[in-house]
Image: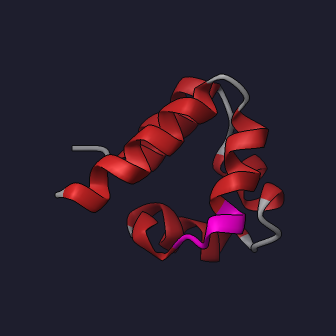
């Protein structure tokens, strides 16, 4: 089952590399973040939301829903 970050990236049509570039991480580090999205900082979350555009709303919603779990 894919987590909210992976789903948001796929919905937005971005590659993992594009997301890694948006938060200035090497792709290997971004892959870890995507497996463990709770490690994102608020600044990284905001940068990804901007990069994802309207799908960024999905990203933010998913982030806050995961905090409730």
Q: How far from the left and from the top, in percent, is residue 18? A: 77, 48
Residue drawn at x 16%, y 58% as measured from the top left: 69
9 or 56: which is nearer to us?
Answer: 56
Determine the main secondary structure of the stretch shown in magenta. helix
Residue 61, percent from left and from top: 43, 39
Measured along the vertical axis of the image, is residue 24 above or below residue 11?
A: below
Q: Residue at x 60, y 27 (%)?
A: 55
Q: Is residue 33 magenta?
A: no
Q: Residue at x 78, y 40 (%)?
A: 51
Would you place residue 15 above or below residue 36 in this image?
above
Res 3 visible: no
51 relative position to 14: left or right = right
Is residue 25 visible from the viewing direction of this image?
A: yes
Q: Position of residue 34 (x, y in %)?
A: 48, 61
User: Quadrant where the N terminus lies?
Assistant: top left
Name the residue nearer the viewer: 50 or 64.
Answer: 64
Residue 10 left/right relative to 52 = left
Give the extent of the magenta segment: 40-44
Measuring 73% from the left and 60% from the top, which residue is drawn there?
20
Taking the image as shown, residue 63 lies to the left or right of residue 45, namely left
């Amino acid at each position: 089952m894919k987590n909210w970050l992976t789903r948001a990236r796929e919905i937005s049509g971005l590659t993992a590399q594009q997301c890694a570039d948006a938060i200035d991480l090497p792709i290997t580090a971004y892959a870890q973040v995507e497996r463990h999205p709770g490690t994102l900082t608020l600044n990284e979350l905001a940068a990804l939301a901007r990069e994802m555009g309207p799908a960024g709303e999905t990203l933010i919603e998913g982030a806050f829903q995961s905090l409730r779990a």
